[in-house]
Amino acid sequence: MKKVLGLLPALFATAVLAWCPSSVPSAATRLPERHAGSPELAGSAHGGPLAIPRSEVYPFNVRRQFALPPLPDGGRDPAAQIARGTQVFQRAQLLRVDSDTPDAAWAASADVASRDRRILTTLAHQPLRNLSFNGTQLSQLNALIATAGPAHVTVLSRTLYADTPLTITGQNVIVDFSGATVQAGPNPPPWLVRLVHARNVALLGAKISGGTNGFLIDSGSNVALEGNEICGMTENGIVVTGLSTGLDIRANHLHDLDRAGIMLDGPVSTTLLQDNEIDHLLGHSNWNAGILLTSRGGDIAADPDTFFLPDRYWVVPQPLVRRLQNPERNVIMGNTIRDGLSSGIYDDGAVANIFLDNRIQGNSKEGICFDNGATANVFAGNLVAGNGRRWGQPDADLALDAVLGAGRGADGTSVAKLPGISMDNALYNEIYANDVVHNFGGGVKMVRTGLFNIVAENAIIDNNLGQNSRFHFFGVELGAAAADQPAVDLDFVGSSGNIIFGNTIQGKHYSGIFFSPGSVQNDVIGDRIVGVEAFKLEAPAQAFGFSTRYAHR
């Protein structure tokens, strides 16, 4: 792997616990057990093991380091003329985001991560009263916190019952559950733990079993959630919303949830998600991903269904140019997201977030999807392996995804596979130095309206595992997919103005790089393409996409 990140070992290890057997999915929905040839056991094309854990952030300017050509996003460039008519480009102008934004966000990410990691340490050095709690109900813990003032509360009880949500609205409080289990009971509140306008608060070591939603942070700052385990929720694990900033969500284990593992909703900024273990999530919607960044409006604290349509699968459509309050400048690093029935990470229009050194493996849908206006994000040094098989997807959900008619293969899964990394109506994103291996529906795919993105120095290996009589897949695809149905929130043009540089594309792919009709002014520079089935570069006559700056190593 490229030396994008530091070389120090991870500061925190996540314990993998299995104390929630009642919510374990059946054999019909679990991913089959891996074997010796599985992606996570293979060596990296960059040398050495894949995705070695790191704990530090080292910013890197891809365009400057490799002297890449300017992105053709101005003047009379054909790609710029196409882009000006799209919502994703118009929205970027409203947000004052341009091609320099991802590098600026990456440069600032080291300070974000360092500062957020110090939240708990700084709080622990405050003059806090040391209190013990022996009660058995969250209402009793609420009463203690409400009258304690600045305090470090250690829970001595082994089981607490959620007769009411644990609600913290003040500041300067540490609650150390010390492994205590919080049981939701037969009539759980919508949120088991609510931090509302809380500041300088830490919640540590809770085991939450069952209920509707786990943790809510609404308009909080300097909040740490560390070492908690959340399983068996009928909805989400951790949700951050409102004007929340400067949070440390680290070393938590979230599993067997019906919706998202960790959600950042709305104008959440400068938050660190690190070393979390997220696995075996049970929801199929894109908004049920392991990590979800979204900005759909509404008050999710009051109504967790606020942005869903009645089918609880798709969301209320909104034109991109109206979605201006987005998660931004957050750092998502060192997380393991595996074996979920949705995507590993779903970036639903978020801006200038940094994704580093995550392991995203074996998810039914994409490893990561940059969708619906995702702009100026950096995705670097990650392992994306074994995703996109569409295992465990029922007919009803395949119909909602408009692929039921494609049929199923001999193994019972849909033949319409998904890629390791997907981009759709996505702009100015940088995909750098990742291991993208053994995915079923392609390596890196711009579905349509992929504009001015950089895909550089990735190892893209054997990502046509889902080839069948109807579909085959590519190392990199610059797509121009038509609409499944009319949409007010997307544009349907080709993928243009992108730079595909220095990638190693080898093994099982139909073609190395594919250009769809209508994809223009894409630069292909120095990619190493070997072992593909048909063509190193494949472009129909209507696609004049690989520019005169094309050079082959």
Image (cartoon, rainbow, N blue to C red):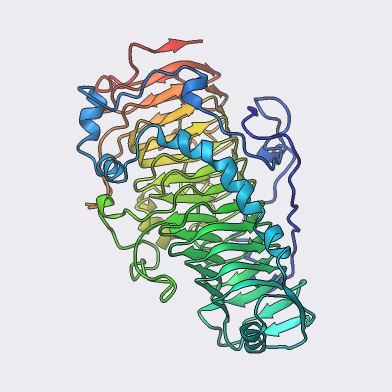
Residue 425 showing in the rendered view: yes
* Left or right relative to 107: residue 322: left
Q: Looking at the image, is 516 positioned above or below residue 160?
A: above
Write the residue at 61% across / 31% down.
4
Q: Position of residue 267 (x, y in %)?
A: 41, 57
Q: Position of residue 94 (x, y in %)?
A: 27, 45
Q: Position of residue 187 (x, y in %)?
A: 55, 87
Write the residue at 52% across / 18% down.
529
Q: Quadrant of residue 226?
A: bottom right
Q: Looking at the image, is 330 positioned above or below residue 458?
A: below
Instruction: Say which quadrant the N terminus sits in.
Output: top right
Write the residue at 39% across / 45% down.
374
Q: Which residue is more in the foreground, 99 or 85?
A: 99
* Left or right relative to 153: residue 348: left
Q: Which residue is more in the foreground, 206 or 6?
A: 6
Write the residue at 55% across / 42% down.
109
Q: Which residue is more in the foreground, 317 or 327?
A: 327
